[in-house]
Every structure is written in C-alpha cells, then in structure tokens.
Amino acid sequence: MEAVKFVRVVRTESSEVYILWDGDSRVGQLDLHYAQDVIHGTLIVEGSLARDAQELIVRQIDQELVSSYMPSFDREDFLITVFRGEELEPFSDGEGELEEESELEEEA
C-alpha cells in the first residue's frame, strides 16, 4: 500500500478528524485529540488491512500530522488505537449537511 491521503473534515482547538484515502477509495477515518503533552488517536480502517499496512499508516500519521503539531521530542506519548469497521449510515440534524459531505467525499 502506498501512502494514504489525509483530508481534514473537522478541526477544533484540541482535536481533528480526517478521512483517509487510497486513490479514489476511502480507507478509514482518524480522530486525533491533543491533551497537553499526550496525543490520543482512534483510527478506524474500512476493510481488511495487513498489520504492516496498519503500521505504515500509523507511522505516516505520526510523521505528517502528529509531529507537525507536536514533535516527538516535545511530547510524552502518542497513543493510537486501530479499529476495523464500516460506515453503516450517516446521521445529521442539520439541513443539507449530509449531501454536501457526500459531494466532498466524491470529489476527493
């Protein structure tokens, strides 16, 4: 597997959410939470990925996203949990938001 592309969909003062793409295929979602000198991540991969592919993605997350926020020498720890799942159905109480998100995902 080549490097995945990260598309940020949410950013707050202490967290970010990314959709992961391998070419035109969505391969997962990443939630990062920044807490002082510790960074927590939840990676949900869609489909089956070999362990070495998961490790490659985690290294890429550390190098491209986490280290740009807080280099490894400044942080106490980077904790990430990897889950395998699939999107069942999105829910929103906002009008038109899901249509816009679907259009953005199709364009990516």
Image (cartoon, rainbow, N blue to C red):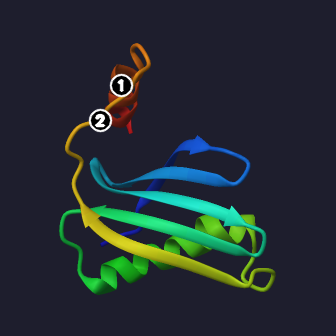
Residue 63 rendering spot, x and y as whole percentages: 60, 74
Residue 108, image quadrant: top left
Q: Earlier in the sequence, mark 2 or mark 1?
A: 2
Figure quadrant of residue 79: bottom right
At 28% from the left and 47% from the top, the residue drawn is 24
Q: Secondary structure at mark 1?
A: helix
Q: Are there few (<14), some (14-19), or many (20+) residues within 10 Å of tag 1?
A: some
Relative to 56, say whether 108 is above or below: above
In which image quadrant can residue 76 be found?
Answer: bottom right
Going 63% across and 54% down the picture, which residue do you hit? 15
Which type of secondary structure does the marked residue at label 2 adopt?
loop
Q: Which of the labelled discs sits on residue 90, or is there none?
A: 2
Would residue 13 appear left or right of 17 to someone viewing this image? right
Type of amino acid under label 2 = Pro
Q: Are marks 2 and 1 in contact (CB under 8 Å)?
A: yes
x, y (%) of residue 35? 72, 66
Task: Name the residue furthest top.
Answer: 95
Question: Residue 98 shows which numbered tag?
Answer: 1
Residue 43: which disc? none
72 versus 85 height, above or below = below
* 27 and 98: which is toward the camera: 98
Q: Is residue 63 left or right of residue 75?
A: left
Residue sitting nearer the eye, 19 or 4: 19
Near-viewer residue (25 or 18)? 18
How far apart in space, not on screen, are marks 2 and 1 (Cα)?
7 Å
